[in-house]
Image (cartoon, coloured by chain):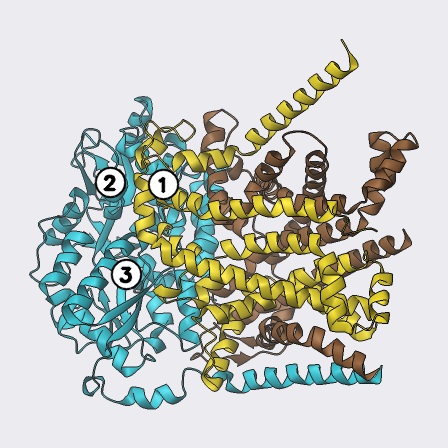
Amino acid sequence: MTKDLKRKIASIAADLALMVFCLLYLFPIYLIVTNSFKSRAEMYDNMVALPKVLSFQYYASALEKVNFAVSFRNSLMLTVFSILAIVILTSMTAWMITRQKNKLSTAIYNLLIATMLIPFQTLMMPLMQEMSIIQRNTGIRMLDTIPGLIYMYIGFGAGMGVFLYSGFVNSIPVSLEEAARIDGCNAWSTYWKIVFPNMKPTTVTVVILDVIWIWNDYLLPSLTLKSKVNRTVPLATAQFFGQYTISWNEAMAALVVTIIPVLIFYLAGQKYIVKGVAAGAVKG
Amino acid sequence: MKKLAKLGTAMLSVVTVAAMLAGCSKEAPAADDNAAANTQDAAEVAAADKFVLFQSKTEIMGELNKLAEAYKEEKGVEIEVWETTGDSYFTDLKTNLSNGTGPALFSLAPGSESREMADYLEDIGSLEVAGKISDKLLDTVDGKVVGIPYTVEGFGVVYNADLYDPSKVTDTDAFISFLQDQKAAGVNGFGLSQEDYFLIAHILNTPFAVQADPDQYLADVLAGNARFADNDAFKDFARVMEAIRDNCTNPMDIAYDGNCGDFATGKSAAVHQGNWCYSMFADYDVAFDMAIAPLPIQGNDKVSVSVPTSWYVNVDADPAQKKAAMDFLDWLYGSETGVDYLMNKFGFIPVVDGMKSEQLDPLSQSVADTVAAGKTMPWVMSNWPAGLITNELAPITAQFFTSDMTGDELLDQLNDAFVNAAK
Amino acid sequence: MKASKLWYAVFTLPLMLIFLSVVVIPFLIGIGYTFVSWDGMAKHAAEFVGIRNYIDVFSDDRFLQAEIRTVIFTIFSVVAINLLGLTFAIIVTTNLRTRNIARTMLLMPYLIGGLILGYIWKSIFSEFFISINWGNWLTDAHKAMAAMIIVTCWQMAGYVMIIYITGLMAIPDDVIEAAGVDGAGFLQTLFKIRFPLLMPSFTISLFLTLSNCFKVYDVNLSLTGSGPGNQSEMFSMNIVSEIFSLNNFGYGQAKAIIFFAIVACITLVQVTITRKREVEL
């Protein structure tokens, strides 16, 4: 056997092993997809088997109940604008506090990451109180509006954004920025022309992680978004979860539909991680 | 450096001021401008053309949304229905009520839940519908009628008529030997399941409810003046629990879905459930008759029937919204469309005097028959201390079913949980 | 000098103001509540009890056990998640043909997230395991904890994989090539070149997994429901039931503050240590 052939076989074997592993790894997801086609009786009979008939009736009834068009649009707006704001604001802050090392910067950094450890459930009651006070006293609608919720997501996303970006700023050579400054750029244009484009891989990471978080988040939107017109996808699917029982097939059907956009987004996004780096944007 | 320190101080002061601001107005939110308006007689206020409804029964959510459309068409009033999962409803409701952003119309379980929220409940005794419902079913707190019942529900031994004959199983011994016989025949005699209410709350209700004066007995237990171990009904209950552990499928191994599936497919002769579980059988070909029988502890011949959920009006809501919510309640129980939804779409057992439903499923029919025959006993569990079932009783019972704890030990531990909760 | 202060404000102030109003102020209000005995309803009087809530915490067995359990859970999970995530990241950045599809598949569990996966896993650990004669894991305290760790790892491994991939991608090709030219094998390159350069990714992943594991709630609720008999109850579950089911708002907040203080100390130490190592390298 030639060395080439050997290598080829080894690589095919490795590919095969990886795929087998991945398929096993996704066993619970297999259950979600298959059971979204089964009736309660069929699921009880055998949860693991393939569905007897491939009927999309539960998809149809789930989509009808959740008013998918409206909730999808809301989720999309919420996710896109929250993340846009998070990326811009956290990257700016992270760059500044990493470059300007002083006590305030350290304090900001520590405060931001320490608060990531607070369980949301202990904040939610005071947060709702504060927001309703702001709403009452200023007339700015913080509750039951998408912009109000975006504002809150910026606050809750601040910690992770700054944390990820500041870890990365260190690996961008200061010399680039100094060169720009000598060319007459101020901090603002240096940042947008030199620094931000160089942080692309981190931006992609932040975006991916935040998309998944915000798109799927239930608790925070459930407290603030109440009107039907404002409902996001996870809120709209809540009705399938009773106190004692779950409408399994509809819940799973809705879930499958919900994650498809995120999946597509991720597929598009992950190429970008590779590209950003391959283009030589970052050199340590 | 100094400038930075100044900036830091400035930011700190922003926080402090904001925190103080929040602190100052903290005690105010519910009691401010609304309060004055609320003292107005609600009848004088014109009803709003829109109000907010929030309720916990997710099973009727789809139909409720259609009802809201029908109401809009008929009366021109829009109902904003908030949504939730069954688990987060109460938390969500409390957070909103406490902040003064609560819904106008909402649901609670009458009993310790409604007593806890008493300050937030409007007196709705003057509603037309309140006059048409028996006092026993209305929720009354501090002498005021505050809750209009959704329906009544009953639970007990939901049995397969081919396998269980309630006329033969009429006391504890007969029930226990039934379980043994079924085990010998390879059938699960009696199914509980792992959810808190289905595991312990419902079944523990029976020994309470068979007491001569259940509420007094509960008070005595909470005060430490009565012990389960000295009471015959509880002793029988402990024997039944041991018999379930010895002869039946371990409840900890089975969830509500599986429990209902076992029953529907004839693998279980009976389950401890209520009429609500009939909807779980919809997808199955059920080839036998079923009904609800009493759990025959101490010769008990009654089924536990009560109001699981009632409607309440938020006392702090905008008066016009309150009026709209109350109009809706009268319409729901008084109009043709409303009653059609209650009886046929929600499948509720009627609560309004003289109202009959032709559309009841077999289990609901069984409950309605029990009510007609006067063979009902109360849900004492609604008055148990808040959080007791989930935080104490269920964990103890889980322990019982996964260890060799004796029935007497189970009684003692459950009893202690009641006493501690009352402290 | 003045301009730089101005720029400092322009770059940090917008985020910090939002952050303060959304996170810090509610947190401070929450601290205020720890000194009262209150059920969380605005109309019900809050009784000032001083530091009694804090004292009570230390005689609350159920809470102390939940805390210890959470620490153990976190240690096991953080190690396992990072090992798994890093392994995944290394595999999917090789030149295997299936790397891209594998990458997506491995992230899927995190993509879905939420409660429903917990419920699915619950059926796997109970009904499915019973059907293949492995017994119900969720009725045994130790196995229930193991199940919690397994499900958490399964969900989070894809998440840290993303971070490690970013880190691995950021290592310039020429460094690896140079090592190859010098005759370094795959493992040698891995340990001598890639891991040291991955230090920032380690810092980030460790911290993110640490904070996520300490706060674990969804999996706890849907998978074990803190059972059997509260023996898999974690810290977040404990305070949520204290606040919302037992109606002890002030006391629940006090528990949260104490635990927060402990966790914040641990993680700040962790971050400082790993950050230092980055600088040294």
Mark 2 — residue?
Answer: B158
- Please, which chain is the residue tagged with disc 1 on? A
Number of numbered discs overlaid on the protein picture: 3
Q: CA distance from mark 3 to mark 2?
A: 21 Å
Mark 1 — residue?
Answer: A249
* Residue type, numbered disc 3: Thr
Pointer 3 local density, CA inside 10 Å: few below 14, some 14–19, many at least 20: many
Could you say where residue B393 lies in the image, as x and y percent from the top left?
44, 52
Q: Residue at x 14, y 51 (%)?
A: B368
- Please, which chain is the residue tagged with disc 3 on? B
Measured along the vertical axis of the image, is residue B310 above or below residue B189? below
Q: Colour of chain C?
A: brown
Image mark for residue B309? 3
Q: Secondary structure at mark 2?
A: strand
Ranked by sequence position, the earlier of labels 3 and 2 is: 2
- Judge left or right: residue A87 versus residue B389: right
Q: Are marks 3 and 2 on the same chain?
A: yes
Pointer 2 local density, CA inside 10 Å: few below 14, some 14–19, many at least 20: many
* Pair 1/2: label in front: 1
